[in-house]
Image: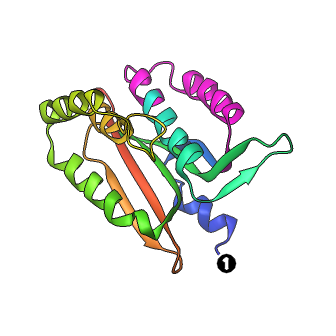
Amino acid sequence: MESVYQQYKDVKDSRVLVFFKGAVTQGVLAEFGSMIRTSLSYESKLKKIFAVFIELAQNIFHYSDERIYSQTGEESGIGIVIIDEKNDRYTLRSGNLISNEKLEKMKEKFSYINTLDKEGLKSYYQKLLKQPRPDESKGAGLGFVDIARKSDGPLGFEIEKVDEKYSFLTISVLFKKED
């Protein structure tokens, strides 16, 4: 078992702005949204960072295969969201369980998005807007494309097999600080 001290050492050189693991609910989104606005009020990319945070958290809320039900019957996805700051950048990361049945489609989606430049992302976004919404989607399938459009680098993604049924999907998004 990793000690809390080891975790402390792992993040020692970062300024962790948000570290949340648990059920992502509308209330959690609102609280962290307020905290991010306060913590990054000086940052010129605040709107983009905030929008990406919301998109990553909503992805967990809607699509995490680890689910929980509140006492009122509200369903939420469970996952982790981290925002950290270093000298020259901000990194947003999220992670959640995903069914192994969805892996190939996710890999293809991320790989394709990462081949596109800013103009290609804009075109692809416009194309998706005009198409009918995919059956399994809560939106128009635009989330990861929108994240890539706002970020300062390719989408980072890592998939770690958990067992025969699930894997853990980690998404990383980079924002460079203004000079």
Colouring rule applied to residues: rainbow
Q: Is residue 58 above or below residue 41?
A: below
Q: Give coordinates of residue 174: x percent, y percent.
A: 34, 42
Residue 75 figure quarter: top right
65 drawn magenta: no
The residue lying toward the viewer, choosing from 126 and 121, is: 126
Work out which quarter of the rendered image holds the N terminus and state it.
Answer: bottom right
Q: Is residue 79 above or below residue 99?
A: above
Q: Give coordinates of residue 60: x percent, y percent.
A: 55, 47
* Residue under the point 43% across and 44% down: 135
Disc 1 is placed on an element classified as: loop
The residue lying toward the viewer, choosing from 98 and 96, is: 98
Residue type marked 1: Met
Residue stretch in magenta: 21-50
Q: Is residue 83 above or below residue 164?
A: above
From the viewer's perspective, is 98 left or right of 66? left
Count of numbered labels shown in the rendering: 1
From the viewer's perspective, is 28 left or right of 177? right
Residue 72 figure quarter: top right
Q: Give coordinates of residue 8: x percent, y percent.
A: 61, 59
Q: Is residue 17 above or below residue 49?
A: below
Work out which quarter of the rendered image holds the C terminus and state it.
Answer: top left
Q: Give coordinates of residue 37: x percent, y percent.
A: 55, 22
Residue 37 visible here: yes
* Residue under the point 67% across and 55% down: 67
Task: Read off the residue under disc 1.
Answer: 1
Residue 21 visible here: no
Q: Main secondary structure of the magenta part?
A: helix
* Residue under the point 40% across and 66% down: 159
* Residue under the point 53% across and 55% down: 11
39 drawn magenta: yes
